[in-house]
Image (tube, rainbow, N blue to C red):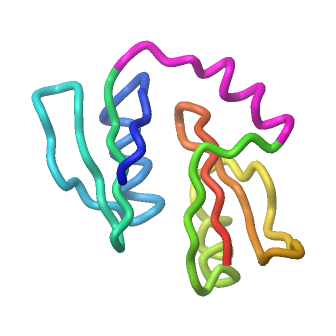
């Protein structure tokens, strides 16, 4: 399964996911569509009109667009803190595990959970 994110700037989004989260480009289609992949996770990015305002307002109620289940979350969070990313929810312990949230350039909220 691969979620599709509509993005305002395809190159900016590709750079964000590659440089900050370690994704690789799986494929590109012309100048408006690409697939990225890492550790079995796949995301499709499509250039289009973005509803950034709606997604940013969703961060107020901890709206999550995508959750990654990972191991080594404490070390990964320490790396994330050194990168130019927006941390929506710092690392915290919850009854179901340890988690944190970040935002991508288009305001999608990405959760990481161990």
Image coordinates of residue 28 in percent, x first then y, are 15, 41
Image coordinates for residue 2, horizontal then vertical, percent: 36, 49
Against 87, residue 71 (above or below) is: below
Residue at 74% from the left image edge and 69% from the top image edge? 99
| Left-right relation of 83 to 92 | left
Residue sitting at x 87%, y 72%: 94
| 107 magenta-colored | no
Task: Please state the horizontal and vertical placement of residue 29, each as a whole percent of the image.
Answer: 12, 34
- Most extreme residue toward the top is 49
Tell me where residue 107 sits by quadrant. top right
Between residue 70 and residue 56, name the one nearer to us: 70
In which image quadrant can residue 24 be found? bottom left
Residue drawn at (32%, 42%), measured in percent from left and top?
44
Task: Please report the bounds of the magenta region as a residue range.
Answer: 48-61
Magenta span contains residue 60: yes
Question: Residue sitting at 70 percent across and 56 percent down?
Answer: 101
Secondary structure of the magenta portion, mostly?
helix
Q: Is residue 97 left or right of residue 103?
A: right
Q: Is residue 66 above or below residue 51?
A: below
Instruction: Count the labels in the image.
Output: 0
Q: Residue furthest left?
A: 30
The C terminus sits in image quarter: bottom right
* Residue 33 picture location, percent across and down: 23, 32
Q: Quadrant of the N terminus?
A: bottom left
Q: Is residue 88 above or below residue 34?
A: below
Relative placement, left or right, of 4 versus 102 is: left
């Amino acid at each position: 399964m691969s979620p599709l994110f509509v993005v305002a700037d395809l190159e900016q989004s590709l750079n964000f996911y590659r440089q900050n989260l370690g994704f690789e480009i799986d494929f590109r289609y012309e100048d408006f569509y690409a697939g990225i992949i890492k550790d079995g996770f796949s995301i499709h990015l499509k250039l289009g009109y973005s509803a950034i305002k709606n997604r940013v307002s969703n961060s107020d109620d901890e709206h999550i667009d995508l959750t990654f289940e990972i191991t080594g979350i404490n070390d990964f969070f320490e790396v994330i803190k050194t990168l130019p990313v927006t941390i929506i929810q710092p690392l915290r312990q919850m009854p179901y595990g340890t988690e944190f949230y970040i935002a991508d350039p288009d305001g999608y909220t990405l959760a990481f959970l161990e």
